[in-house]
Image (tube, helix red, strand yellow):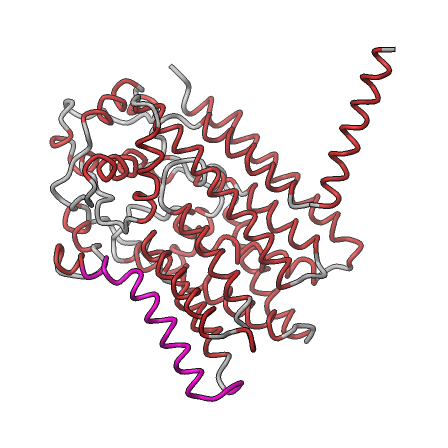
Amino acid sequence: MVELVAARCRRGALARSLGLVHRHPVAIPLVLSLIFGAIYAAMLPPWDLIDEEQHVHYIQYFAERRELPTMGDTYLSPEIVASLVETNRWQRLRLAPPPNDDPRDWGLEGLSYEAYQPPLFYVTMSVPYALLPDQMLVKLYGLRVLVVLLGTLSVLGSYVLVRGVWPDHQILAVAVATTLTLIPERAMAVSRVNNDVLVELLSVLALLLLAQCVGPGFDLKRGMAVGAVVGLALLAKLSAAPLIAATAVVWVAGYGTERFRSWLIRGAAIAATAALVSGWFFYRNIAAYGEPTGIASFVKVARFAPEASFPAMLGEIARGFWGLWWWNRPLYAFGVVAALAFVVALFGVGLCYARGRLSRQQGMMLAAMAALVLFAAAGVWQGASSGWVPFVQGRFMLPAYAPIVILFWLGMFRLAPVWMHTRMLGAAIAPLALLNAYVLFYLLPSHYPLP
């Protein structure tokens, strides 16, 4: 009798779970995001990201001093140095260890070289940092958990964005959100402490607001909301600058749909709001470093060899999209697959326009997302060709990941009849899941064995 009741309870729980998934299919990518994020956050060795210790130190510095660090004269804290030594960081990464425990003798690695970065991510994370227990490793993994939650919010935002712009294509929204979750480079980026995660979330939020601003809905209030989010994104990281191009596309598209004066005032309101939110930081950089971005202060202490050519740069972006280990070691030779994804994405945009099945909102959002992707790639190319970064990392494109995936699936679904869409999604998700398993259960244990 007891076994019968237990069996019925299990069947009832399963039925309720399936019913929840049927009513709210976004639950699938959200659960996957949390599961994969937790696994990556736990299995990636401590201080694994090329500059995770610098990101954490920025958070620690603000939490303890309530002021922003200055690039060039701020070094890693004794607590972080002790944790790096205790966790055998250099042995894990198979690098030569520093000469001693004084970060001032470590060269660039001992500097808190993220100090020039905009402060929003670090100020936000300083609150939970202060509440976490005093052990540095506990703080590190606690911050990783919060980063995973931010990444999951981006997945949710991408789903809501697609459902709002393409309300009759639920499978498209599920495909976009699930694919975002399973891209290996993104899965690693949103499981370690870095400010790119917040930029991605704010970029998705900005696109959500822009989707509501196409046509008559683009009033002054919503325009100021867009400006505020763009300003916040710039306060998270300068890689959010392509949002300016996406916003400009939607604003320019409104020309001729209303009185010129109203159109002009709204554009000025967007720009003024963004400047009001973020302008103080650029003014601070001018006072501290002599230029608004702060990048010059980083280049003074770290100048890298520029990328050889534009084609090589495109290859690096394609390869970085799928995942990199320490110092530009690729996870696997699937850069060709990434390049094909970019081609299909661009082809999908052209195909959508050619078929003429787009509403005004859909057309403008496609144009805005395409502008975001192109300007993001141009920004990465600018940084690499100028010697600002040692190598291209896929996470540099994180603000454009959602648009890239949306354009990719639009192109794929336009190439096939509706009855094949679910099968296409399954055919794409299965290898992505296998790639993540390959990373987690083969590459991690073999390349970075635990002591």
Residue at 27% x, 54% y is 306
Image quarter where the C terminus lies is top left
* x and y percentages locating residue 428 in the rendered image: 65, 45
Residue at 20% x, 55% y is 294
* x and y percentages locating residue 6 in the rendered image: 80, 17
Does the image show residue 380?
no
Does the image show residue 91?
yes
Q: Is residue 214 above or below residue 135?
A: below
Magenta segment includes 266: yes
**Res 4 quadrant in image:** top right
- The residue closer to the viewer here, 451 or 140, is 140
Is residue 121 left or right of 296 when viewed as pictured?
Answer: right
Is residue 136 left or right of 415 when viewed as pictured?
Answer: left
Single out the residue that lies furthest toward the front. Answer: 221
Image quarter where the N terminus lies is top right
Count every numbered label the image shows and give the total.
Answer: 0
The dominant secondary structure in magenta is helix
Magenta segment includes 357: no
- The residue closer to the viewer here, 131 or 14, is 131
- The residue closer to the viewer here, 203 or 410, is 203
Is residue 324 left or right of 349 when viewed as pictured?
Answer: left
Q: Is residue 419 above or below residue 244?
A: above
* x and y percentages locating residue 87 in the rendered image: 31, 20
Residue at 56% x, 48% y is 156
* x and y percentages locating residue 329 in the rendered image: 39, 37
Magenta residues span 256-283
